[in-house]
Image (spheres, rainbow, N blue to C red):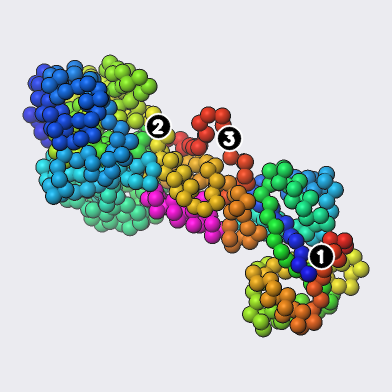
Amino acid sequence: MKLEQISIFLENKSGRLAEVTRVLADAGVNIRALSLADTADFGILRLIVNDTEKAKQVLKENGFTVGKTEVIGIEVPDRPGGLAGILEVLGREGINVEYMYAFVQKSGDSAIIIFRFDELDMAIKALTKAGVRILKGEEIYAM
Amino acid sequence: MIWDEEFETLPREALEAIQTKRLRTLVERVYALVPPYRKKMQEAGVKPDDIKSLDDLKRLPFTTKDDLRDNYPFGMFTVPLERIVRIHASSGTTGKPTVVGYTKRDIETWAELMARTLSCAGVHSGDVVHNAYGYGLFTGGLGFHYGAERIGATVIPISGGNTKRQIMVMKDFGSTVLTCTPSYALNIAEVMQEMGISPSDLKLRVGVFGAEPWSERMREEIEKKLNIDAIDIYGLSEIIGPGVSVECIENKKGLHIFEDHFIAEIIDPDTGEVLPYGEKGELVFTTLTKEAFPLIRYRTRDITRLIPEPCVCGRTFVRMEKITGRTDDMLIIRGVNVFPSQIEHVLMSIEGVEPHYQIIVDREGALDVMEVQVEVSERLFSDEIKVLESLAKKIERELKEALSVSCRVKLVEPKTIQRSEGKAKRVIDKRKL
């Protein structure tokens, strides 16, 4: 149920993001989802890719600081209130979302949201209990 | 005005006779009372009896900041702690500060030297001395304070910081003399401008500025912006604090060294060989009158040259040029001495921090700013912004605590800090003095 996300430390200077995507492209790694968080000095790029190990290896070889984190992907109905319902479940259980980012599936009838929790197992339990569908890793890597 | 006419205008021969007598007493004392000195002299094969003239001074071993660190905190004192009435400290090269002690008589000597210093800079009784040097372990605040009281001036012990309030006090109390670092004087001038206060609203006449190197260009700027005479003063806590040498207001060319208390030598920093007057090299001091913590041939690491020609002011003491550099990598940030090794020491004590860092010093307006760049290793890295930001804040806090001066920490990508073959380039100083 858990997904592997890689994160990359980037200084705020032009061209760095391009370098990451070029390194991945040259290695034949496909990006499924991404988000970039930034401050005045630096940014953290978070990626879900089709081949986590390979991505991590080639980025390290190219001198990037790379981390690996477990996250989950949830399918959310693509209609008003879809996300609110899920966040209410988490709120009731007192589970804090560290960060999240979304993308829309090709078919267009549902959105995928990637969640990062501190207490991942508790979150999975609460969401499963509420009938939320948590996507399997293979489903997302293969999208 | 010359505070101590008798000593400050001594003919060279008479001065040297006093120096010789004091030097011989000093060498006997430290040999008898301070084991580290005795050991070094024995290793060099010199006995107190061998020191008969000033020319024999060069036979004595040098003393360095490392010697002080090795005997931290009180190992170089000649008297037991009961006879020490005051302790001051300055930056050491690692985690421990350099500690200095004063007997009652030392405090007396220091006040006299500061009275001479302020008089030399044109300060006199009736002046209102706005003392914005830091009070505390730093020698600046209290050194000036005692000297100003000694000459009968009115002291405002305002210490550093809160610039708008400083300006209000100067205006309302009618300060005539400003004492602080030269960069802080410029900062005051800038803030005055912002507040719409012109120099003619103040009674300032003279500024006595030190604790960091500054150029003639900076002097012109300060003199113009504050409409005062800006005088350079030199000192270091190991020797006594401020009060080692100062420019005279009549000439402002070279700082008169109070040679009846301190012998100055210029040496080649690589060979240790003594250089003749006029040649540039490292400044070395021997203290002749200090009781608690005398120093023999202390290497200041400051680079300058000595000027023996007589001065228009009438003082016969040799002068030293403004300091033009250092033989080590010490930085002076807002008047505070900072060694890159201190920064390294702090970084190494933080779990996961790599020994790769760079220090970038710049000047924003009149104030020094220091940025420490730290590489983010995999062990430090997190996918969460808040974790990295709190890491940077933590390093900033620990550096501030160790250095007594604030800096900004910037996290950078690994391997982006230049690795060099030999000595790493740790410091980029962009300041234009």
The residue wearing badge 2 is B328
Residue at 19% across, 40% down: B77
Quarter-of-image position of residue A141: bottom right
Residue B289's x, y, as percent? 14, 34
Q: Secondary structure at mark 3?
A: loop
Do the residues bearing badges 2 and 3 touch, measured as CB atoms within 8 Å? Answer: no
Pointer 3 local density, CA inside 10 Å: few below 14, some 14–19, many at least 20: few
Residue at 59% across, 62% down: B386
Q: Which chain is indicated by disc 3?
A: B
Q: Is residue B351 visible?
A: yes
Q: CA distance from mark 1 to mark 2?
A: 57 Å
Stretch of the chain drawn in magenta: B389-409
Q: Secondary structure at mark 1?
A: helix
Discs 2 and 3 carry the same chain letter: yes
Residue B249's x, y, as percent? 23, 33
**Disc on res. B419:** 3
- Residue B397 magenta: yes
Q: CA distance from mark 2 to mark 3?
A: 20 Å
Which tag, 2 or 3, sits closer to the chain's start? 2
Left or right: where B342 falls relative to B311: right
Q: Which residue is more in the foreground, A114 or B171?
A: A114
Q: Secondary structure at mark 2?
A: loop
Relative to B303, is B414 above or below? Answer: below
